Amino acid sequence: MLFRILAITIALSLSACSSWVFRIDIPQGNFLEQKDIDKLQVGMNKEQVKFVLGSPVIQDAFNTNTWHYVYSLKSGRSEKLNVHKKFILHFDQDLLTSAEGDFVLGDNFYVPMVN
């Protein structure tokens, strides 16, 4: 009888460790939406870009003309739901010149800003 109770107790405690633990989603970085990317245009200054997208996650101390926006989401439920996106902006004399990354540039991106 004691052996059965001990076996059941061990089995229940081992099963509780594996599948019943709640794991939270862990988002990090800048969450960007396509509607915000569509607002960007060549010729925007850094302040205008920062107003639209927010501050970049990574700004190289030696090259302040390149901004990196990075976002990752580690899902607590499944590794298939993990997300990693990046978006890199290049400036020349504080004006936006090009962009690259995991987003589609808007139709008006290459239309220069009129100040």
Image (tube, rainbow, N blue to C red):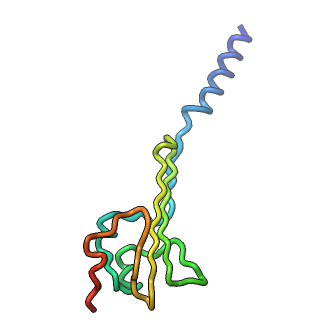
Q: Residue at x 46, y 45 (%)?
A: 81
**In the rendered view of the protein, which quadrant contains the N terminus?**
top right
Q: Give left or right: position of 49 versus 80.
A: left
Q: Which residue is drawn at 49% across and 76% down?
A: 67
Residue 102: % across, % down = 42, 62
- Could you say where residue 18 lies in the image, as x and y percent from the top left? 60, 32
105 or 70, which is in the foreground?
Answer: 105
Q: Which quadrant does the C terminus fall into?
A: bottom left
Residue 7 position by quadrant: top right
Which of the two residues, 90 or 50, is positioned nearer the viewer here? Answer: 90
Q: Residue lying farthest right?
A: 3
Q: In this view, does 50 lie to the left or right of 8?
A: left
Image coords of residue 106 (percent x, y): 29, 70
Query: In the displayed structure, does residue 68 sit left or right of residue 61?
Result: left
Quarter of the figure with residue 12: top right
Taking 5 as reference, is 108 left or right?
A: left
Which residue: 49% across, 56% down?
84
The residue located at (45%, 79%) in the rendering is 90
Q: Residue furthest top?
A: 1
Q: Is residue 38 above or below residue 84?
A: below
Q: What x and y, as percent, mark residue 72?
A: 50, 58
